[in-house]
Image (tube, helix red, strand yellow):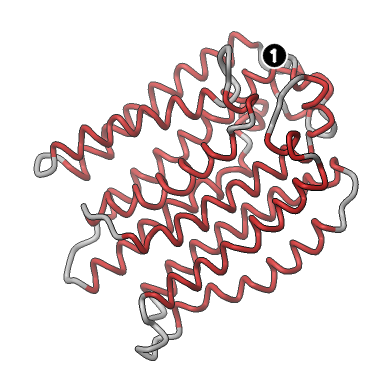
Amino acid sequence: MKHWIQAARLRTLPLSLSGIIMGAFIAKWRLSENGGTWNWRIFALALLVTLLYQILSNFANDYGDGVKGTDKNRIGEAESRAVASGKITATQMRNAVILLSILSFVATVALLYVAFYPANIREFWIFIGLGIACILAAIGYTVGKKPYGYLGLGDIFVFIFFGLVSVCGSYFLFTKSVSWDVLFPATAVGMLSMAVLNLNNMRDIVNDELSGKKTFALKLGFKNAMIYEIILLQLPILLMLAFLMYNGFQAQGKYYPFIVMILIFPFIKLRRNIMAVNEPKLLDPFLKQVGILTFLMAVLTAFGLNYFN
């Protein structure tokens, strides 16, 4: 059980929850403004689904990198990779990926049934397709003959699924509507998710080059990947400010939603600390820090809009 928990990589879970929290509580605020109702069952099921997707992705990555030998020369993290270290066999991990895929699909159907059935059948089937796409994306990062993570496309997929799909999709589950301003927080969460992936790939840049895993960070080179990282960490807080300003809270004399802006200071410190790193392996602790800041951004936005306002 210990090895399975390690393979689930629990430190990645707060990041995966951030998009759901962001989208769900923006929806809660908007529904309360318009006299609508917010369903706690949808929120609970959405959290369950995203956790299953994240664990599925982590298991699939462990399996895919393990069977391809990518983790063989990994610095500082090989001991936490179950297949590469031999703590879990490739067959066991493959079976776990299949099981998690089934559980993820069942949980997705349950979520969409509660959210859409019977009044929104068309949306139900559209989101079924989206759920299948999420499952395939979780597996396809490192598994298969041409995994997109080995082609430098991981950043794009992370932005789409951790940002746009997670935030805008969860918002739609509650409101059954689309609002373009939700793209501000969706882009913010997506960029921070890209920042985590880029840090991960910068850390592993030497090993990935040896194993033929052509990540976007490897294509950029360490120096340019660092510039890219700083941009990814700079823009999200500005996007959140744009979202709040667009909705006119300052004009209404409502300043509690701006509580999320206190994260400017830890983000500044984080960027400075990352820029001071010259050795790729020293970037590992920052992955968790970016994930926690993303989670805090979602939670502070949720409280600022709904409970402090």
In this figure, which residue is indicated by the disc labeled 1?
Answer: 68
Foreground residue, 39 or 198?
A: 198
Residue appearing at x 61%, y 28% in the figure: 149
Residue, x 68% and y 12% (percent of image)?
Answer: 67
Q: Amino acid at mark 1?
A: Lys
Q: Quadrant of residue 102?
A: top left
Q: Residue at x 32, y 34 (%)?
A: 108
Query: Which residue sits furthest top?
Result: 91
Residue 195, image x, y percentages: 65, 49
Q: Position of residue 163 (x, y in %)?
A: 47, 49
Residue 214, position as x, y percentages in the image: 71, 27
Query: Image quadrant for the N terminus?
Result: top right
In the picture, the quarter occupied by the C terminus is bottom left
Q: Residue at x 29, y 60 (%)?
A: 179
Left or right side of 90 for 48 = left
Q: Nearer the viewer, residue 190 or 27?
A: 190
Q: Is residue 259 above or below residue 4?
A: below
Q: How many marks?
A: 1
